[in-house]
Image (spheres, rainbow, N blue to C red):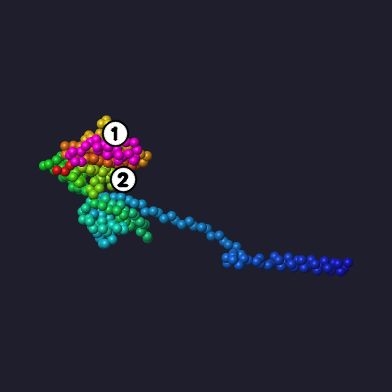
Amino acid sequence: MKKHNTFSIILLTVVAALSLSACGTKPQTNNNAPQGADKPQTQQPQVAPEPVAESQVKKGTGVYNGAADPHTVEIETNGEAQSFQLGEGLDTVIAGLKEGDPVAFEYTEKAVEGDATAKQLTLTKIQKTEAATDSNQNGSSGQQVGGERTKTQTFELTLEGKKEKQTATLAKGEGYSLYVFDPMCLFPDQNRVALAVDDNYYAEITKLPSNFNLDELQKDGEKDLASIGKVQKLDKAAVPQALTSSRLFLQTNGSKITQQYIVVENTTGAFSVKVNIPHGEPAEGFESFIYTSLESLQANK
């Protein structure tokens, strides 16, 4: 009995020792595991990178004041001179401008590091516009003097349902002149009058020969507009009131855009005009301005 107890005590002692040895032994680690993988890891909070703001392209009009250096030009807008860095490829465009030229341009703004109030302005597009800036000192409403058209003329038009008087400036294109309101510019190289802030709103003008054929022009207009949608010919009652000189008015409406093909004629000559009007907030004001401008079209003698 004594031997049996002694044996039991020895057996229990061996089992306990093995148990302690097993608890204290490190587990075999995988040689391919990354260093320190056997240690508890403290999870670091992940910080999402700040989104990089895309540079928004802005538009403006002004007067070109010249180059400050090979990479910087100055443009006067709203009576204030601003410096712009030249974007890629614009050095050749700037070479064709003269000081005092009226221009329309597009640019981006970028914050200057270390100065929250400073902005770096970079031109992405610039072109000369044709717009007289002189106004008659006597405030003439535009009556012709000695056969010449006055520099400015005042018109009454409807904006946001209200009649207003607005002054427009005489601008000259290829073989014609017309009065253009401040929100718009004439781009003579394209024969387009367009909104300065969004040149997708435009009227493209073509001077017609004296022997034009109205039926042929209607066919051309219908073919041009057909890609947008069904083409309608507006009768006189449906034509905008500002266009009393309209001989033909075709229109098509797409899901995002309205296009028109118009023939206007007066004692000086005739013109075909393609009008492009995206469906957006500026549409109503643009239509009122552009129809009034088109009514003032005159062929140069």
Residue at image point 34% right, 40% down: 228
Q: Quadrant of the C terminus?
A: top left
Q: Does 20 appear above or below 204?
A: below
Q: Position of residue 265 (x, y in %)?
A: 20, 37
Q: Quadrant of residue 195?
A: top left
Q: Position of residue 140 (x, y in %)?
A: 16, 41
Which residue is disc 1 drawn over? 233
Residue at image point 17% right, 42% down: 299
Q: Is residue 225 magenta?
A: yes
Q: Does 294 appear above or below 7?
A: above
Q: Position of residue 273 (x, y in %)?
A: 25, 41
Q: Is residue 271 visible?
A: yes
Q: Quadrant of residue 159?
A: top left
Marker disc for residue 200 = 2
Q: Quadrant of residue 123?
A: bottom left
Residue at image point 23% right, 48% down: 188
Q: Which residues are magenta?
A: 208-233
Dot 1 amino acid type: Lys
Q: Is residue 224 magenta?
A: yes
